[in-house]
Structures are given as structure tokens and as C-alpha cells.
Image: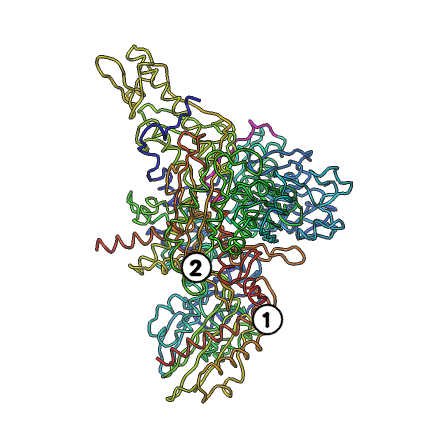
Amino acid sequence: MNDMTQTHLERELKIVGTRPERPDGVDKVTGRALFGADKSLPNMLVGRVLRSPHAHAKIISIDTSKAEALKGVKAVVTREDFEDLPSEFVPNGEMVVNFKDITRNIMAREKVLYIGHTVAAVAALDAEIAEKALQLIDVQYEILPHVLEISEAEKPDAPLLHEDMFTIGVNPTPKNASNIAKRVEFGFGDVEAGFKEADLVIEREFNTKPVHQGYIEPHACLASVSEDGQAELWCSTQGPFVVRNFCTKLLGMNRSQLRVTASEIGGGFGGKTVVYLEPLALALSKKSCRPVKMVMSRAEVLTSSGPTSGANVWVKIGVKNTGEITAGECVLKYQAGAFQGAPVGPGAMCAFAPYDLKNVRAVGFDIVVNQPKVAAYRAPGGPISEYGVESVLDEIALQLNMDPIDLRLKNAAKEGTTAPYGPKLGPIGMVETLEAAKAHPHYSAPLGPNQARGIASGFWFNIGGETSSSITINEDGTVGLTLGTPDIGGSRASMAMMASEELGIPMNVIKPIIGDTNSLGFNFVTGGSRATFSTGKTVVQSTRAAIDELKKRAALLWDVDVEQVEWADGHARLVGADEPKSLSLAQLAKEAGKTGGPIVANASINATGAGPSLATHIVDVEVDKETGKVSVVRYTAIQDAGKAIHPSYVEGQMQGGAVQGIGWALNEEYIFNEAGEMQNTGFLDYRVPVCSDVPMIDTVIIEVPNPNHPYGVRGVGETPIIPPLAAISNAVSRATNLRFNELPLSPPKVLSRIAKG
Amino acid sequence: MAKKHVSTTINGDEHEFLCHPQQTLLDVLRDELDLTGSKEGCATGDCGACSVLLDGRLVCSCLVLGVEAQDKNVETIEGMSSGSDLHPLQKKFIDLAALQCGICTPGVLVAAKALLARNANPSEEEVRFWLAGNLCRCTGYDKIVRAVMEVAAEARNTQ
Amino acid sequence: MDYVAPNSAQEVSQALSKEGAFALAGGTDLLVKLKTRMSVPQTVVDIKNVPRIRSIEKTGDSWWIGAATPCAEISEHADFAKDWPGVVEALSLIGSTQIQGRASLGGNLCNASPAADSVPALIAARTTCVISGESGEREVPVESIVQSPGKTSLKQGEFIVGFRLPLSANKSGDAYLRLIPRTEMDIAVVGAGVALSLDTSGKIAAIRIALGAVAPTQVVLSGLEDLCVGKEPNNDLIEKLVAIAEDACKPIDDKRGTVEYRKTIAGVLTKRAFSIALDRAKN
């Protein structure tokens, strides 16, 4: 495709790869930026949600009459206000969703399936009245036995969450319903034969707990439905188009009836790719014909929005004494929460993907339990399976007395390697990250007492998907960019940089905004590390289309053939003429009215060719062997970005992902009591890392360009959360001369393992 | 219960407002005065996104009642820049990409300003412990800590 | 809910003697309870306008710390911090910088959590508290206040005005340590406060140790005078203290730690806090 040529190979880059100020920077440091809860409308109501106090129960009846009669209550909605939807699976990035389940998750129908499951919602004049109204709603339940753990849920006699769930992916389909929604398998070769060839075979079982994305901004939205059914929705989301599609489907509306505008988003990490409050606010607004604002409390975020799976992981790896892997096998059991859709597919696909294996098999099970339905979380499924594989590799390296980086280098996937999930890999940076790790001063730095070093690698696919954006050349030669993927960590900067590079004009005359759902064609979410890759492709494509148009306009003004016009440094230049001529972008823009009207361009694509991003992390930990407390004392993250458009924000992704991984490894977990009630529903006991918990996170950006992007971009957001789990576990194992097979490595667990010896 | 009348100073301006006794200062700032720069991430004092200065002391505005602001001096993120001049911390946060999503940024900036007012030469450890009550889920804190330390160093050099 | 902020101890007591009245000092616990509806007060009585309730003074043979003085102000008081470094360590651990700007010793004590960080250190330091009520003032040891989680021995209408600590003696030292999973922002899994003094020959002259988060209330280790006074502070003695600390624990399993873990850590922290206090006493 001519318009997507490899710019990075063509010419020296002036903007791409530098570190300019982000366009939304001032708004963000002055408190001016408007997030989900920051907008209000005249005549607005406040919405609140009644949530299930039971982990599993049949809803016998819901009586809302007293709540409706309360003064100041303007609308109450329950299951009666949402049409039932048939089973329909729809891909949603790396995840799959089913509308039959979504409608039941946003509002319980036959049963409640977890504590915190929505049962009713109220809109009232203020929060106090709304909360009083919730207490007046009479729900009669028939309590059913519940099941929280995978090991219990998979038993044939376990309490069933869904009586119509028959495991998919098993031939023949089982006759009996179970909590196992799905079985997946990836791989090739003959693993049994591979294990026979091995000099050393290690198999281990690992367990991880559900963990939450922990975005600091709770879910929030503001809906306004008018008497004629036209609706506006303002919300904090990674994907306004996906929100529109979900909400219109759930509410029986046409897409044109609902315009969704994404607010600034206060973190998402995958968790804001689905809907919770949005359809409720719309339904309440529709009923009351007044704007309705809804904001979750932190406790609601934890109990009622989706964390990622807790899991049981079994890994078996065989190697020759040389370190060559002869076979790798894993069985992954991921809990999905109350509805199917655990990210076990991607977990199984990438478990062994950093390596070039002849014999590999990864089997996964998607298991429902009475916990909140999981949502995507940064590289969904990847950290869990790769934690198991990378831990076993570390043990193998120790037993072979081999450097753990050398072991990985010996088996590293390269261009042409067949990935365990099927395709041949293009150019990837596994070898480069490992070599950079080995050469990094951190890797050979001396360690203090009770300290040890761990390393681990990570693989993530990254995705493309449907994307649309547009460019407008303003009358004075400045530029507007309208983008459809919410800016979650600086993407407006990278998009403006790419347009600036293409046009040859300063970045600060380009204004990038996130458009609403009426301003562009469909955009899939900001997720799957796709924004800089996919939206970047559309920006380059539309900018090049605008340049083509500018060249035409110049040709018209000069009365020459367009082939005689080239574009460089923000100017159209006449080539091959006796007298050099040039017109700046501003001059051309000024004349646009005379040369055919406004200059705009749009690019709408289904982006393909996302490049996998590989990483290797090095961590030093110190273990207090008397208390079991683990401190991270040094950390280095090395990752192949393909091309870092704005290196500061690439580093930021690497650092932020590493620290989320540190939290997952050390202290984050959902803790339930026997009744299925989450015990740690605030940041006090759901322990995300605080500033004093972590050291500086050193970064090394490797650039092995992705040939499918004009600047070589791969996408970097997700991979960095993968290596920390195993890197830290491996370091703790080495510090104590014991193996650790369970996360989180919280002080009581570490001390108990040390005591066992 | 009837609303209470409160007179207070916010970012140097005198304000009067009516609030329910149970409304927090954060509720008042956001819902009554439209000062939405202070954010609510938890409402229980665990995230620091609502950080403000109350008579010069760094507090979580979610843990202060609105009525307690009577005769007090409240400083929020909206008062950090003066005219079109950003505070050096604000500038540095943009320069060093010390923010990603930006939801924690107002609270972090208010807290960092309070630190530098007290300690012109904070060590990395002092910065980290001072900011331990400001959760950031995006940055891993690295660039935030660097930005605060650089501003402190530059302020020392220009003195 | 109503809010009042009287200017005298008398008026505060009157306001607090009404049904459903709650005292507000720094509010860092009370406002969380309001938000989560764990408390539904009729009236919040702001006690911060009472004289001396926000002050730090050295008076004759003792320190006065007003019950509503924010912890940040206490730890900034160099002379007090020099006298009672362990107490200051303990109260500095109550929450973040933001919490420190509001949280107070009176609130930390009256919240009646077994995990309150300042309380073991105050008990070890033989702190008393001055209670004001409708019938005047009384002064009791800090350890007599917490009865069970969330419950104090204060009568209706009573509130704590301030704390009295002795001036620190020569050759004395105190220390407080707690274990939390992170480095900040957590509730103590176990806390240990130690205060001791040495005689001229370097033997122990007095010692007090209190533990937090290992039983429904803070635990004061008993039998220490007999075991320690007149003895060399050596490893043998420390091991005995560790055993006493472990035995004194009656913890529960909860989201923050197990029974077994808490017992072990009580011993470890006792040992470590003892060593710090000892070093301070020597210097």
C-alpha cells in the first residue's frame, strides 16, 4: 500500500522519537480536564444502585413501590426495564462478550450471581434521597449454595451458576451442565515424545488470585435522554463506540439515537471496555426525562466491576542438558467470575510464545464462580500463564546451573518462528531484549545481604481493529485531528507527532481531540496496545491523503501537472521547473476556498499486522526472612517498542506496567469470606503499590520496527505487566533457596513458606 | 437538617456557601462550587486525589467536613498557577511526562507543592514517603518523583 | 445530622451527652464511618475549639499533648520528638501525609481499634489522658480507655482533652515498630512499643512493652519488672521477652494476617523495637 510506506526507513525523523509537551498537558496539571464525574447538567438527577447481598440467589420478587413513592425519587429501574437478549457472542478485543450475559450482568434477571450484582437502580433529586430509596426496595431472594474457588467450581456436583452451560470445545459436548464454560487448546508437535527426549523435566502448579485494574477514577457517567428518545451519554470509557453499541443493544435503541462522548479517562487498563452504569443511567434518564449522573464508590468498583481472573496453572517443561527445550505443556484454569469469558484463550496462546518450540501444548478452561465477572486487564490472561512458564524456566536454569538469560536466548523465538498459536512470527525483539538485559549494568551489579535477582520475559500479541480518524486543514494552515480512541496515557501527543512529521509543520499547530460517536466511523476501544498502532495508521494515511490534496491545490494554482509537485517541510514545491516555486501549508490553506473548498481527509481501516512486543525485566528483591516481607530494591524493564513515537510515554507504559505487576506479585488480591463477600473493598486493604513501595524503574527501549506500521510501531502498553510476576517470584525464590508457586507473595505467605522449608 | 452557612477563603478568594453538615469539603468544592479539579478516587482518605491545603496543611478534602472550612484558608489545584504562569511543578510534570491519565495529577501536585514548601532539598526517599498517600496507577511513580526532585533542585540553584 | 463546634469543654460535654452525638477531632476515622454508614450520628460535635486541645506544651515535669493536635504538628515539635522518639515514630505512622495533617492522638485512641499505631507507644511511655466530662476532669492511664474493638470506657458526655507524658529520664529510650505489607498506607498487622531506662551500670531500671493488633485491645506485657529490672539487656533476656510477647498474643485470623503469623511477628517486632529503644537509652 503506497500510502503506508515505511517512513522510518525513508528519511530522517524530526518529531517522531522526540519528547514534546503533550497537547492536553496544561489541562491535566491545572485541574481543568473534565473526567467522568466532573460534568453536570441543569435539572440533573443522581443515580444509585441496589446491589445483591448474596453470592448466589434466585430473585423471587422485587417490589419498588415504596421507593417510587418516596418524595424526590424520579425513576426506578429493575430487570423489568431491560429486554432479555439471546445468546450472541461478540469479540471485544482480546476478550469475547455475550449479550445474554451483559444484560444479566448490568441488571440481574433470574438470579444474582455475586455479592455486588446490580438488582435495581434509582434516580432522585440528590444522593441522600436515592440512597434512602434503595433501602425501600423490597427484594425477596431464595438463597442458593455458592461456589468461589476454581477447585470447587469444576467439580461435577458443584452448585451450578448457569443451568444451560455445557462446556464448549469438548467433543462430544457434555450431557451435563457444569461451571466449565469452555475448553481451548493450542500447540503442535508431540509433547510426550519431547519430554522423552529431555534430560530434565520439571512440572509445577501455580495459583494466582483475582486482581483489579485499580484505576483511580471510579466508573462515572452522565446520561440525558429527551422526550423524543434522543440520547446523549458522557462517560469515562476506553471505547465510546463500543459503549454506544452495547447500550443501544441493551436498551433497544438505534445507534443514531445515542451519541456517546468520552470524558477524559482516569485510567482503565482494560477495565473500562465494558458497560456497567451507562445503560442504567440511560434507562433512568429515559424514564425520568431528566439527566442522570452516576458514579461508583470505590467499594462498588471493586465488588461490581470486573477484575481479572484468579487461576490455577500447571506447567511442564523438558530440556536437554544444553538448555534446549524439548517440549512445553501447560493446563490453565482461569475463573471468569459470574459469566463466562475468562481470558484463558490469550493466556494459552502466549504462555510459550517467547520461545521457539518444536513440541508445545497449552490447554485452557474458562470456569464460572460466584464472583464479579472479569473484565480485560492489561494483556488479559498473559501475566498468569507466563508467570507459570517463566517460573519453571528459572528453576530449570538453576538446576542446569545455567544463566537464566542464556537459557532463554537458547530458545528465543525469532522472525520465522512458528508461534504456539499458529502463525509464523514476523520480526520480533526477544533476542534483542535478552541481550540488552545481559549487557545492562543492573544484571551484573553486586547484591546486598538477603537480596537476590530475578528475571523473566514476556510476550504479548497486540491488536489492530476497526479505526477511523480525520484531519482538517484549517483556513490558517493549522490542523485539527479528530481521533476515535480515547487518550488514556498520551496518545493525542503521539498522533499529533505523526501528523506533524508527515506534514512537516510544528506539532503545536496541530490540535488533536477525541471525537464523539457522531464525528467518525466506528472505532474499537483504546486497548490491546492498539491506539498508537491503529489510530496512528489512520492518522498517517489521512495526513498523506491531505497532503495529496494540498499538492493538487498547488498544482492548480501553478497550473502544472500534480506529478510536478512534491511535499517537503510543510511546503508544496514545484519540481523540474526552471524557477523553483513553493507554497506553504498556510498559503495553500488560505487559498483553499478558491481551489475547491475545505481540505479534509479521513481514514477508516480495519488495522491488521500488529507486531508482538517482547520484554525482559530484571528485579532485585530483599527478603526479610523473619517477617516474610519482600522489598523491591532495583528494577529494570527492557522492551521492544518497534518504534517509540514519544519515548517518555513509552517509558511511562513500561514503568506503570512494571509497578502494576509488582502489585500483583506482592500484595494485591481479592479476599473473600465464606459467604462470598469481598473483605478488602478499599485501597486500604486492596493494596496497590504506593510511591514508597517501589524504586525508580529503569527502562531500555529496543526498536525492532514493525513492518506493518509506517513508523514501525508495535504498541507497548500491555507487555510490561507480564514479566514482573515471575521476575519477582524468581528473585524471592533465589533469595530464600525455596520455590514459590503462589501469588501474591504477601508477608504471611512468604514467611509460612520459609517456615515450611 | 437545614443547610449551614459557611464563609471561607479558597485560592485567595472569599467564598460563601451553604452545605449539609455531612457534606465533605470535597463534595462542596466539586458539587457546590464547581471546583472539579480535586478528584474523588476513594472518599476514604486512601488515594489522595482530593488533596488540598487547609490553612497550609496538606489534607484529604474527602476527610474534612465542608462546615469545618469556616474561616479557613483552602488551596486547591485551581489556585496553583498564577495568571498564565504555571507553577514550576506543573511545568515540570508536563516536561517530564510525569502524568499519564492525569486523574491523580491535581492531588499529586498539591501534595508536592506542600512538600517543597517545607523541604527544599528532599531525598528520593522523603519524596516517596511524602507522596505515599497519593496513589498513581499509571506511571509507576518514577517520573513523578524525578519531576519533584528536579523542581526542588532547580529552585535551590536559582536561589 | 447536625454539626456544632462549641468553644468550651463544658459545652462540648453537654453536646456529647445527647443521644447520637459523636466527637470530631481530625475526622480521619469518623468521616470514613460516615461515608460507609458505619456511624449515623445525630450530631457531630467538633471538639477542636476547646482550649488546650490543640497544643503541645512542656509543663513542669510532664508533656501536654492536646487530644486534637494533628500528628504532623506533634512530629514537627523537635523537643518532644527528642524526648519520645518512639511515640513520635508511632504517631507518624498513622496514615499518609494528608492523614497526618488531621489525625490526632485523641482520635486514634478513641477510635478504639486494636491496631491503632500510637496507642502501644503511648502505653509503653506510661501516658495518661485527661478526660473532661459534665462533672469535671479525671485523669487515667491510656490503657484503661479501649475496652474492645470500637468501644471505650468513656462515659456519655466525656471526651479526651489531652495526654500527659513524663519528661523522658536520663538513659532512657523508646521505640515503636509495626509490620505492614506495604511501606505506607496500611493498618498494622502487628505493632510493638517499647520504653525502657537503664541504671548507671547499664542494667535495666524500668521497662514497659505494649503490643497492638494481636488481641481485641492493646496488650501490655506483664511480668517484665521481675524479669528485667536489674538485669543486663543481653540476648538471653531478649529471647525471654520474645517468648512473653508471643504468649501474650490472642490474635484472630483476618484479611491482614493469621494467628500464627501475628504471634511470630509480635516476637520479632518486640525484639527489634527493644534493640532500638536500648540503643537510644545508651546514647
Q: Which residue is at the front of the view, A557 or B64?
A: A557
Q: Which residue is at the front of the view, B158 or C142?
A: B158
Residue C70's place in the image compared with B151, above or below, is: below
Q: Quadrant of the C terminus of chain A?
A: bottom right
Which residue in the structure is indicated by mark 2? B68
| Mark 2 neighbour density, 10 Å: few (under 14) some (14–19) many (20 or more) | some
Q: Does residue C5 belong to the magenta stretch? A: no
Q: Mark 2 lies on which chain?
A: B
Given this view, does label 1 or label 2 mark the residue nearer the observer?
Answer: 1
| Residue A645 picture quarter | top left
Compared with residue B123, is residue C51 higher up or lower down, i.e. above or below? below
Q: Provide the residue designation for mark 1.
A: C251
The structure residue drawn at horizontal position 21% and vertical position 55%, both measured from the top left corner, is B159
> Residue A352 or C196: which is nearer the viewer?
A352
The amino acid pointed to by label 2 is Glu
How many numbered tags mark residues here? 2
Q: In which quarter of the image is the N terminus of chain A?
A: top left
Find the distance from the CA under tag 1 to the CA under tag 2: 38 Å
- The residue sitting at the right extreme is A175
Q: Position of residue A719 (x, y in %)?
A: 48, 43
Percent across and percent down for residue A556 are 32, 12
Report whether A527 appears left or right of A133. Answer: left
Asked whether residue C138 is in view, the answer is no
Q: Where is residue B98 in the image (x, y as percent from the top left)?
A: 37, 47
Q: Is residue B52 above or below residue C84?
A: above
| Disc 1 and disc 2 in contact, CB within 8 angstroms | no
Which span of residues is magenta-colored? A253-267
Q: Do marks 1 and 2 share a chain? A: no
Q: What element carries label 2?
A: helix
